[in-house]
Structures are given as C-alpha cells and as structure tokens.
Amino acid sequence: MGKDVSRLRRVSEQMRRDLAVLIQVELKDPRIGLVSLTDVEITPDYSHAKIYFTCLSQADSVHPTQEALMHAAGFLRSQLARKLGIRQMPQLHFIYDASVERGVALSKIIDEAIAQDRARMKEDHEDAQKG
C-alpha cells in the first residue's frame, strides 16, 4: 500500500507542475490571469483529480478563471495524458483555494493588533514618565 500512496503523490506533484506550465504557455483565454496551482489530489483509482488554484490578481476574477479552467479541462487532460504516460487520465476538477487569501487576511489582523499593542505600550510608557 505504501508504494501506491508514494506513486500517487509523485503523479500528483508531476501533474501540478505540468499543468502549471500548460496553463501558462498553452491557454490563451483572457479570463485566466495569473494562476498558481497549490495542490493536486488524485483519487486512488485515478478517476478524478481535484486541482486547487489561487488567483494572484484580483479576487473578483475567481469565478471567470474557474469557468475558463473548467472549459479547458478536456484540452489540459489530453495534453497531460501525453506528458505523464499513465494508463488512466483522471477527470480534472478545478477548485478555488482560498487559504492564501485567508492567510493574508489573518496576517493583516495580526499586524493591526501588534501595531495597536505597541501604540498602547508607548502611551503607557509616556504616562509613566510624566507621572
């Protein structure tokens, strides 16, 4: 079983790399801007692959980008089949990965909290020196 999981991981990672190049070089759809593929999960029977992506441009471009990727899924699947040389090429399902966006939002909240804490500490220090 360990061999199958290891092979599945290798195929997933190779698929992610190859898809990233194909999307960047081969797809000419204007709805697809800067896209980063964050992960590929393939079912053990190789029937389906979930491709997680983020949009590096505007957040409002997610839906059109996802539609364009799904529209190109057949083309991408046929190109991948040539490159990977696996017996069964999975159906491609593109899913928006909001984790990067959430991470940026959380980082912003943390930065604001630190700035407020520093301002409060500075005020306390100044009040202590006056008093």
Image (cartoon, rainbow, N blue to C red):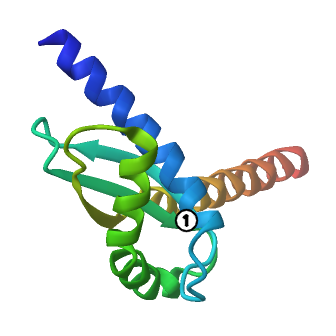
Give the farthest residue toward the top: 2
Q: Residue at x 11, y 13 (%)?
A: 1
Label 1: element kind = helix
Residue type at tag 1: Ile
Relative horizontal placement of residue 17, taking residue 63 as reference (left or right):
right
> What x and y, as percent, mark residue 128?
81, 45
Relative horizontal placement of residue 42, taking residue 118 as reference (left or right):
left
Q: Residue at x 40, y 46 (%)?
A: 39
Q: Count the marks.
A: 1
> What x and y, as percent, mark residue 38?
46, 50
- On the image, which quarter does residue 116 sit in? bottom right
Of 38 and 2, the residue lying toward us: 2
> What x and y, as percent, mark residue 5?
21, 21
Q: Residue at x 55, y 65 (%)?
A: 23
In the picture of the structure, the residue carrying the numbered disc 1 is 23
Label 1 Cα crowd, 10 Å radius (few <14 / some 14-19 / many 20+)? many
